[in-house]
């Protein structure tokens, strides 16, 4: 029963932030009545004996817990969303510094407690330029002047959702510092924040700051050491990634080993076991008789828990460490009360408790991967318990241990496969092989040495230096082995796209595969995979997506087995932020696209074609068209786009180039915008939105020519030229076409003011609805099998994405 309640609670919270229309929203009274009903069901379950009634009772309890979890998490989310920064402003803030900063190549990132912006304190993430300001000191108060900005994601499928990340971290805004002034505690009191100072001077708050200062001290100490691998040494010890090399991060990602860079349960347990082993040796040497009065497991249980808590605090209470703390705490309670430990109950209960204190942990991949791996390891441990190793020789035991290691790696890889697809949309095929040597070496050699070095730092620094030196050699050996494998296999991340039902089939198959022996036939796992043979990711007859790429444009079109892109977007400096790598490639990956049949670069401005240089090495482009010559790879063909070209994608989708004329191509490099490739897309069998006009950056001159050349042009959806600038989308052009919808692709807070107020006024005057990638994210037109065509907006998929911004 406990397992069903915990599973329902976790399942309900997993819907956090999802835009579920018609879910059962509860008042406060109803919420507590449901909790009371759940307790009643639990009591009844203990008394009834009939199996059918117990099963029905458990199922009912699962759904009640699910409703409670869903409402609890969404209430917490709405409370958090109330304090998000909604617009950019120049402000003066009073802040307290309670946590360690993170060093970036050019800036310092730090979490600050802001006292004077709302009725309660909030957390902001600040950015400080290293060359302009000294780092803010932990335990101090400051008056800061600068610009606060809201967090804004690129709302495109497959792209990292920074708004979700900020919500998870409880950061309400970004603050760029311009002026710093240190102020005293008395000054803060005089400003009316005496209650916060009292709270900030409590024992708990002081202890947290003391821990942060110790983390800062160990960072400085490692920074001064004459060792090569400072970044990995620090990251594996405290979770602080300030010195971590970007190339090493990328290599660990390609090997599927990123989880090894995070603080995990073994880190915590290694420290606790070391301390308890030392305490045990001291007791055995000086007062062994104490074990006659108090059994060893009871005597050491509190020191063990204290060590686990201290190390969790030391690494900032990261999710894997918190999981370990809760599991050890629950297991300790069960041991003290002599209650039989059930592995699955322990995991579900610890996860449920974690989500009570922090329901936003559910958004973290670390939560699911941590508990998923833990479940698989427990199943492996149960298998080991069934085997008899006592009669084996040392060689046989070594072989058995190796078999268990190999078995654990492939089982973890297979079991976590769905989670890897859900969170990262890609897998590293080399993961089982790399983990075979990396996990034992890191877990049994590097981490213990790192922990010993960290412990000895507080006792005897020269000894700590020695341990760090030895550990540096071990890390060098690990990286050498990884580099050797890299040279041999050249591992790359493989994008994987699956629809909902394919994922359900795989999950059901894995549940059967990892279920206890004899519960159900393992052959059923294979049967569950049969539907994958007929699965098809192309669920729509036609789809057109105006991608959210910030200030730029990229449009993806797919119909049956043909794919087409219009522009790739591009950041002003692709070396600082790559639209191709961070937006377009992830989007194509989650859609299962590795080849683009037709690419139209409407013109060669950076915001329309800047990402092409990166993408051409990652995606195969069969045919590339543009108004200027573009360098393509040998496996691609280039041709100029010009008026009159027609492309029959299939029997019901046709594309025609309306501009520029062939004689205008020589002028394209002098007037890129007006000579943009203008495309007209027709979906002949759609019941609605049959005709799409994609204007590139064309302005009034091109609009006039199109009206002259195509006086009877039918347009249902118009992608506005030049991102909605005032020099495009003339009143006459809009009035003549009268599209049902206008779309603008522009960046949040862009310096050009796109879409211009003049164009918005024209559209309003003509009653033409405007959709913007700023407010709606990626905008999709999807044609179903019955020819109905619907519009999806990416910002409607999550509650934290649904908001309007203003400058």
Image (cartoon, helix red, strand yellow):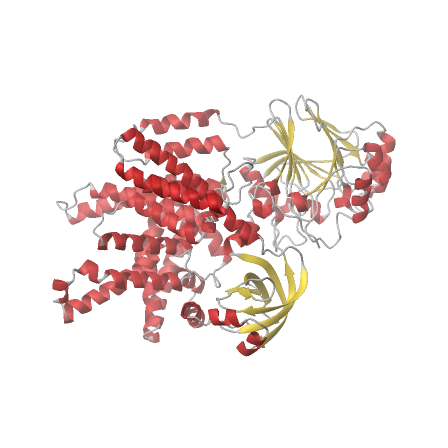
Residue 346 visible in the displayed image: yes
From the top left corner, tell me how far across and down residue 225 is, in percent: 42, 71
Task: Depth check: give the residue in front, 370 or 233.
Answer: 370
Where residue 460 sits, quadrant-wise, is: bottom left
Where residue 316 sits, quadrant-wise, is: bottom left
Q: Quadrant of the N terminus?
A: top left
- Report the residue at 32% width, 52% height from top: 327
From the top left corner, tell me how far across and down residue 92 is, in percent: 64, 68
- In the picture, measured across the screen, residue 37 lies left or right of residue 492, that is left
Task: Depth check: give the residue in front, 6 or 760.
Answer: 6
- In the picture, measured across the screen, residue 388 lies left or right of residue 89, that is left
- Report the residue at 32% width, 63% height from top: 449
Q: Quadrant of the C terminus?
A: bottom right
- In the picture, measured across the screen, residue 733 lies left or right of residue 85, that is right
From the top left corner, tell me how far across and down residue 57 is, in percent: 34, 34
Residue 433 visible in the displayed image: no
From the top left corner, tell me how far across and down residue 278 is, in percent: 23, 66
């Amino acid at each position: 029963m406990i397992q069903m309640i915990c599973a329902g609670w976790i399942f309900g919270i997993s819907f956090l932030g999802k835009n579920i229309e018609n879910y059962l929203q509860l008042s406060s009274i109803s919420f507590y009545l449901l909790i009371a009903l759940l307790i009643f069901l639990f009591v009844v379950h203990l008394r009834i004996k009939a199996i059918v009634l117990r099963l029905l009772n458990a199922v009912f309890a699962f759904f009640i817990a699910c409703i409670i979890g869903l409402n609890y998490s969404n209430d917490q989310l709405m409370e958090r969303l109330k304090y998000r920064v909604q617009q950019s402003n120049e402000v003066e803030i009073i802040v307290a510094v309670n946590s360690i900063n993170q060093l970036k190549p050019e800036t310092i990132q730090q979490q600050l407690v802001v006292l004077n912006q709302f009725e309660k304190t909030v957390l902001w993430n600040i950015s400080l330029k290293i060359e302009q300001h000294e780092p803010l000191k932990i335990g101090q108060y400051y008056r800061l002047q600068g610009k606060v900005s809201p967090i804004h994601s690129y709302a495109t499928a497959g792209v990292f959702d920074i708004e979700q990340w900020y919500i998870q971290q409880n950061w309400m805004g970004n603050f760029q510092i311009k002026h710093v002034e240190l102020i005293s505690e008395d000054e803060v009191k005089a400003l009316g924040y005496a209650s916060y100072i009292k709270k900030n001077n409590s024992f708990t708050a002081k202890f947290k700051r003391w821990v942060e200062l110790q983390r800062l001290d160990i960072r400085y100490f490692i920074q001064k050491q004459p060792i090569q691998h400072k970044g990995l040494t620090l990251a594996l010890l405290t979770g602080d990634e300030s010195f971590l090399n970007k190339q090493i991060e990328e290599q660990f990602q390609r090997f599927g080993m990123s989880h090894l860079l995070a603080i995990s349960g073994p880190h915590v347990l290694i420290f606790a076991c070391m301390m308890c082993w030392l305490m045990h040796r001291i007791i055995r040497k000086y007062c062994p008789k104490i074990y006659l009065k108090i059994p060893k497991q009871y005597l050491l249980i509190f020191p063990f828990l204290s060590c686990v808590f201290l190390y969790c605090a030391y690494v900032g209470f990261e999710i894997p460490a918190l999981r370990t703390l809760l599991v050890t705490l629950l297991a300790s309670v069960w041991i003290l009360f002599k209650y039989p430990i059930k592995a699955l109950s322990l995991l579900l209960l610890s996860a449920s408790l974690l989500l009570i204190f922090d329901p936003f942990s559910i958004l973290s991949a670390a939560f699911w991967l941590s508990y998923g791996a833990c479940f698989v390891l427990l199943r492996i441990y149960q298998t080991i318990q069934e085997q008899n190793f006592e009669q084996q020789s040392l060689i046989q035991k070594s072989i058995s241990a190796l078999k268990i290691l190999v078995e654990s790696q492939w089982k973890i890889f297979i079991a976590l496969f769905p989670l890897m697809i859900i969170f990262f949309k890609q897998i590293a095929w080399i993961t089982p092989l790399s983990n075979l040597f990396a996990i034992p070496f890191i877990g049994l050699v590097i981490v213990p040495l790192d922990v010993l070095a960290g412990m000895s730092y507080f006792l005897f620094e020269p000894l700590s230096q020695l341990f760090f030196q030895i550990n540096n050699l071990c890390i060098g050996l690990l990286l050498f082995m990884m580099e050797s494998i890299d040279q041999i296999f050249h591992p790359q991340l493989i994008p994987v796209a699956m629809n909902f039902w394919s994922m359900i089939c795989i999950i059901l198959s894995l549940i059967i595969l990892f279920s206890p022996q004899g519960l159900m036939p393992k052959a059923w796992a294979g049967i569950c995979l049969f539907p994958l043979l007929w699965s098809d990711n192309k669920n729509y007859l036609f789809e057109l997506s105006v991608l959210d790429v910030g200030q730029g444009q990229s449009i993806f079109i797919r119909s049956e087995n043909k794919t087409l892109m219009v522009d790739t977007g591009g950041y002003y400096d692709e070396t600082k932020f790559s639209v191709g790598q961070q937006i377009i490639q992830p989007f194509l990956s989650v859609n299962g696209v590795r080849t683009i049949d037709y690419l139209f670069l409407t013109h060669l401005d950076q915001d329309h074609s800047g990402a092409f240089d990166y993408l051409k090495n990652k995606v195969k482009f069969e045919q590339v068209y543009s108004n200027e010559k573009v360098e393509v790879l040998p496996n691609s063909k280039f041709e100029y786009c010009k008026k009159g070209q027609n492309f029959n994608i299939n029997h019901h989708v046709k594309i025609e180039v309306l501009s520029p004329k062939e004689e205008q191509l020589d002028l394209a490099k002098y007037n890129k915008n007006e000579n943009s490739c203008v495309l007209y897309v027709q979906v002949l069998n759609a019941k609605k939105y049959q005709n799409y006009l994609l204007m590139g950056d064309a302005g009034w001159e091109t609009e006039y020519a199109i009206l002259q050349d195509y006086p009877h042009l039918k347009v249902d959806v118009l992608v506005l030229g030049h991102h909605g600038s005032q020099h495009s989308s003339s009143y006459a052009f809009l009035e003549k076409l009268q599209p049902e919808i206008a779309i603008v692709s522009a960046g949040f807070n862009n310096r050009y003011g796109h879409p211009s107020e003049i164009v918005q006024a024209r559209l309003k005057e003509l009653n033409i609805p405007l959709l913007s990638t700023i407010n709606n994210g990626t905008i999709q037109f999807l044609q179903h099998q019955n020819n109905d065509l619907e519009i999806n907006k990416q910002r409607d998929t999550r509650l934290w994405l649904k908001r309007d911004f203003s400058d």
